[in-house]
Amino acid sequence: MNAVTVFCGSKPGNDPDYMKAAQELGLQIALKSITLIYGGGNKGMMGAVANACLDAGGRVVGIIPKLLLEWEAQHNGLSELIVTESMHARKLLLFDKCDAAIILPGGMGTMDELFEMLTWNNLGIHDKKVYILNINGYYDSLIQLLDTMDQQGFMYDAWKTRLIAFDSVSSFMNALI
C-alpha cells in the first residue's frame, strides 16, 4: 500500500479519543512510509492526522476545493496541497490518489465521502478497500443500519465485503501487517 485517503471530521468531536485516534493513525501511516491523502484542512481531526504524520516525517497530500480554503483553513505545512474547482473534483482526486480509504469519526462530509466510495465500489468503478475505524462505538448505529439494509433486501451483496470495520487504530494496523 503506497497511499491511503483518510476521511474524518474537520472538528475534534466531543470524545478526546477521536483526536487521539487521528494522531495515532497519522503516526502509523508515517511509520509505514505510506503517503497520507486527506481533505487539506488544519482543523479538528483532519489537522490532527496530518500533523501527526508530518511530525513523524511522513508525506501528506491535501486536496481542498476553492470553496473551503477559508472555511477549513487549509494546512500550509503539507508536502503538497492541491486546490480543486469543486467538491466533486476533490472527491475524485481523493479516490484516484489512494490505494485504500480509512474512515475515522466525522460528520456529514465524512458520510458523503464514505458512501461515495462504497457506491463506486458497489458499481464496480473500483475495488479499493474501505476501512472504518469505529472508535468507542461511534459507528455502531451506522453498522446497525447497514445490517438492516442488508436484511431488508436493499444490498446487492453483503456490505462487509465492501466495508471492513475495526474498533481501534492498533487493531487496524495489526490486520494490515
Image (cartoon, helix red, strand yellow):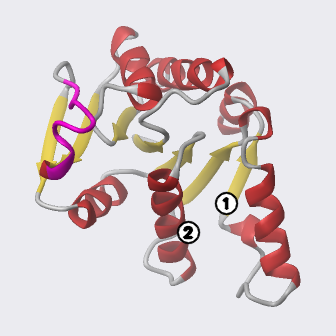
Image point 25% across, 37% down: which residue?
62
Spot occupied by residue 53 in the image (x, y as percentages of width and height): 40, 19
Answer above or below: position of 43 versus 110. Answer: above
Answer above or below: position of 77 versus 109. Answer: above
Judged left or right of residue 2, residue 23 is right
Front residue of 134/30: it is 134
Residue type highlighted by circle 2: Leu
Residue type highlighted by circle 1: Leu
* Magenta stretch secondary structure, dominant: loop
Answer above or below: position of 81 versus 108. Answer: above
Residue 73: within the magenta? yes
Tell which residue pokes out farthest to the right in this image: 151
Q: Secondary structure at mark 1?
A: strand
Spot occupied by residue 18 in the image (x, y as percentages of width and height): 62, 26
Mark on residue 163?
1
Q: Are marks 2 and 1 in contact (CB under 8 Å)?
A: yes
Answer above or below: position of 33 versus 131. Answer: above
- What stretch of residues is rendered in magenta? 67-75
Image quadrant of residue 43?
Answer: top left
Judged left or right of residue 131, residue 140 is right
Judged left or right of residue 89, residue 170 is right
Task: Tell me if mark 1 has few (under 14), some (14-19) or many (20+) residues whose alpha carbon lies within 10 angstroms of its own.
Answer: many
Front residue of 67/121: it is 67
Mark on residue 118?
2
Whichever of callouts 2 and 1 sits on the residue coming sooner in the sequence is 2
Residue 107: within the magenta? no
What is the distance, in whole Å, between disc 2 and disc 1 at their CAs?
A: 7 Å
